[in-house]
Image (cartoon, helix red, strand yellow):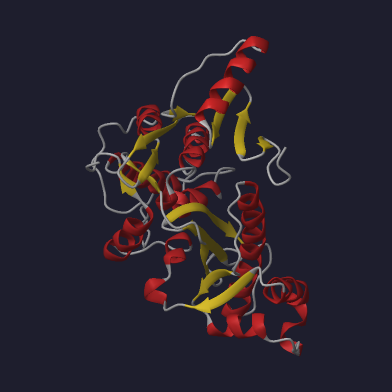
Amino acid sequence: MSATDPSLLIYKTDSVRMYILIYVDDILLTGNSQTEVSRLLRNLQQRFQMRDLGSLNHFLGIQAVPKSYGILLHQQAYANRILEQAGMINAKPVSTPAQIKTVLTTMSEAEFENPQLYRTVIGSLQYLTLTRPDIQFAVHQLSQQMHQPLHMHFENLKRLLRYIKGSSDKGIALHDDDLTLTGYVDSDWASNQKDRKSISGYCNFLGKSIISWQVKKQTTVARSSTEAEYRALATKASEIIWLRRLLEDFHIPQKEPTTVFCDNTSAIALANNPVFHARTKHIEVDCHFIRDCIRTKQISVHHICTEDQLADIFTKPLSNFRFKQMATKLMDEHTSSI
């Protein structure tokens, strides 16, 4: 059993390696020897009632499409079911999942009369984000209102569904190429209008393939943009450590420190500075953690200009041009040529 993921079972003998991923009664089986994989499958079928469904094409609502570069994972069928559930299957598509500025009406502040529908759709959309990093920020923002949604929140939800209507065939591309782990991290300081907490966002790549991402509201109020960025960097470092350990289970050790791109020079300086300052006493734990990761050569923090910061899409609503620019680098379409 993998120490990093208890649902992942690993078999090793001599040069043979096989991996079994289990979720309830759904199983993925793969390895570097087709003969051994077939033998193991026969043994399992003798002991358990199970069926061989062949090569991977569908798993837990996620469809896998072979491509010239590798595999595309998408959830088009699931996305269409969400649209049908919300009565938006014939909606007019829009180009972005969230508006930069919210347009208020006389009904905006009124409570939405069907909160159960709102919560049901949001719950479904959270699962859709498994292959849709482009909607992660919008879903995160709408999820904050599930306890008491207003009409303005439902209008924002309908816009998100209209975006999904026009992009249901999008998914994440897994490239059969370089296996070097890299990451991007960003934050939007004091962006929450009610409590002034900041939003952290990050994404990680294995070569050209995006493999993990997160949007999260920080638990405490940051006193500066540097602090907000630094707290986001601490969260990012935890994910990097876990991914590096998981990759070791797959015999893909990261021999060099994982490069993390950040666009805040002050946060980078704080991460590399061994001297604590009075202004940063309140984030001392984060300082120790990140600096230890740098000292042990698990991560290496580098500056990147804001225009090239891919994590920007996880921290704020973007203009049409900026959003398309970022989303294109994260996503692919399963209708594109093989």
Residue drawn at x 74%, y 89% is: 277
Where residue 30 sits, quadrant-wise, is: top right
Q: Which residue occupies the foreground of this view, 133 or 237?
A: 237
Q: Is residue 328 above or below residue 291?
A: above
Q: Which residue occupies the foreground of this view, 132 or 246?
A: 246
Where residue 323 sits, quadrant-wise, is: bottom left
Q: Position of residue 329 (x, y in %)?
A: 35, 59
Q: Which residue occupies the foreground of this view, 7 or 112?
A: 7
Residue drawn at x 56%, y 43% is: 146
Q: Is residue 297 left or right of residue 88?
A: right
Residue drawn at x 61%, y 10% is: 49
Where residue 24 sits, quadrant-wise, is: top right
Q: Is residue 135 above or below residue 256?
A: above
Residue drawn at x 37%, y 74% is: 307
On the rendered image, what quadrant is the N terminus found in? top right
Does any portion of residue 113 appear in the rendered image?
A: no
Q: Position of residue 273 (x, y in %)?
A: 68, 87
Does any portion of residue 234 appear in the rendered image?
A: yes
Q: Is residue 241 above or below residue 307?
A: above
Q: Is residue 274 left or right of residue 21?
A: right
Q: Position of residue 171 (x, y in %)?
A: 37, 44
Q: Position of residue 104 (x, y in %)?
A: 37, 56
Q: How many marks?
A: 0
Q: Which residue occupies the foreground of this view, 112 or 290?
A: 290
On the rendered image, what quadrant is the C terminus found in? top left
